Image: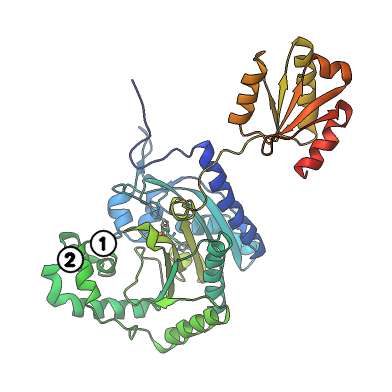
Amino acid sequence: MKFSTPRGTKDILPAEIAQWNKIENTCRDLFKIFGYREIRTPIFEETALFSRSLGSTSDIVQKQLLNVATKKDRGYSLRPEATAVIVRAYLEHHLDKEESFVKLFYIGPMFRGERPQKGRLRQFHHIGVEAIGLTSPYLDAEIISLATQILDKLGLNGYQLKINSLGCAKDKEHFSNLLRDSLKAKVKNLCEDCRERFKKNIFRVLDCKQEGCRAVVSGLKLDGKYLCPDCQRYFIAVQENLKLLKVPFNINFTMVRGLDYYTQTIFEISHPDLGSQDALGAGGRYDNLVKELGGPSVGAIGFAFGFERLILVWGEKNPPMLPGPDLFIANLGKEAQEKAFLLLGDLRRTGISCEMDYSHSSLKSQMRQANDKKAKLVIILGEDEIKNQEVTLRDMSTGIQEKIKIKEIAEILKNKLGL
Ligand code: HAM
């Protein structure tokens, strides 16, 4: 019997790990510079946490939660996203008592029972940040600029940043009434799901990917007039700050995001190379969520990138690769093998990554192994070499060989490898 990965999941193979590490380390470096600290949370949580925060009528809660159940326990789901989870952890551990403004980052798998397609998986990974405890248009611009700096640092060009504001809770209500009025005459052109959404959660109509619904939405004349004067001022200040930071953006009044907790600034970064699932990452402000989940009334904002989507775009120019060892020790004869084994241990202790042959293969076969493993350097150790206390060192990229003294090996290798 043969097994394979469940539908919509992926193995991340050794050659791809280098790509993952590069992106993760780039993010980690920037998170540190911006003052974010790492947090790790369970991959499953109470289902009610998600219905309460993402919205019981959101697609994620309605259709995509993957439930975890044992014979005894029910009511748990694999996390579809981390924002609600981070707020849960922030409240549970009273992180606000340590600092009034808390900046956290996370990386880990998320789960949504979606129909898999390019860039859409059932298990995917988020790398994201949440800044809890402050409402300031400076922070909104700073966090958006952090997201774009990650892409810039990775050398990923051609992305587009869209921003919008949903305003405060009252504005959102005003916005939904406006939408209802404008869509009333067009309900018959919407898909079945959207006709339901029209009744229960009209914003979700704007997210629908069905062609008919997209055509209806693109015909709407939305202009952000639903914002109250305070929220309008706030949104303008965010835009001004983005300009100060030289972050190019477009305002998209039809962007509403698929999760209910958002208020005020929302944003999405898309890339044309991704096709229909074109969002690389997204985020926004959720000033009411902490209170909704039983905490104080504090503002918060965050974003998350979809790791697999970053890899899809960035990986085009940065293909998977298996990094080879610094050194391969080819050895010929019993005595040389023992010496090589000792040398292997000594060199590893000095920080040089090395491999050797344990199976008395021919020199030709050992050179082939070194080549297959992509070793940078090869040392050849045989009886003559032991007698003369000298080994042959071969640079695999140039093919140049030289004799070096056994006692000087570590020093010379470190020099050559720049260690
Ligand atoms: P989201 O837009 O649902 O936002 O997800 C963020 C990103 O995760 C998307 O832009 C996309 O790149 C990726 N993504 C989402 N679903 C999938 C999937 N099925 N397969 C592969 N990638 C996917 C959130 O989850 C919010 N928690 C972001 C946030 C943080 N807002 C505030 N703070």
Identify residue for label 2: 212
Residue at 45%, 55% (x, y): give it: 313
Q: Residue furthest top?
A: 334
| Residue 305, image x, y percentages | 47, 58
Please tell me whether residue 136 is drawn above or below residue 34 in the rendered image.
below
The type of residue carrying mark 2 is Gly
Q: How many marks?
A: 2
| Residue 409, image x, y percentages | 83, 31
Q: Quadrant of residue 9?
A: top left
Residue at 36%, 47% (x, y): give it: 121
The type of residue carrying mark 1 is Lys
Identify residue for label 1: 209
Residue 187 is at least partly visible in this image: yes
| Residue 189, image x, y percentages | 13, 68
Q: Residue furthest left?
A: 188
Secondary element at image label 2:
helix
Please tell me whether residue 237 is drawn above or below residue 156 in the rendered image.
below
Residue 53 is at least partly visible in this image: no
Secondary element at image label 1:
loop
The colour scheme applied to this rendered structure is rainbow
Number of other residues with Cα within 10 Å of mark 2, as a class: few under 14, some 14 to 19, many 20 or more? few
Number of other residues with Cα within 10 Å of mark 1, as a class: few under 14, some 14 to 19, many 20 or more? few
Residue at 78%, 17% (x, y): give it: 382
Please tell me whether residue 220 is drawn above or below residue 14 in the rendered image.
below
Residue at 56%, 49% (x, y): give it: 40
| Residue 326, image x, y percentages | 70, 36
The quarter of the rendered structure image containing the C terminus is top right
The quarter of the rendered structure image containing the N terminus is top left
**Does residue 313 appear left or right of residue 415 in this picture?**
left
Q: Nearer the viewer, residue 162 or 86?
A: 162
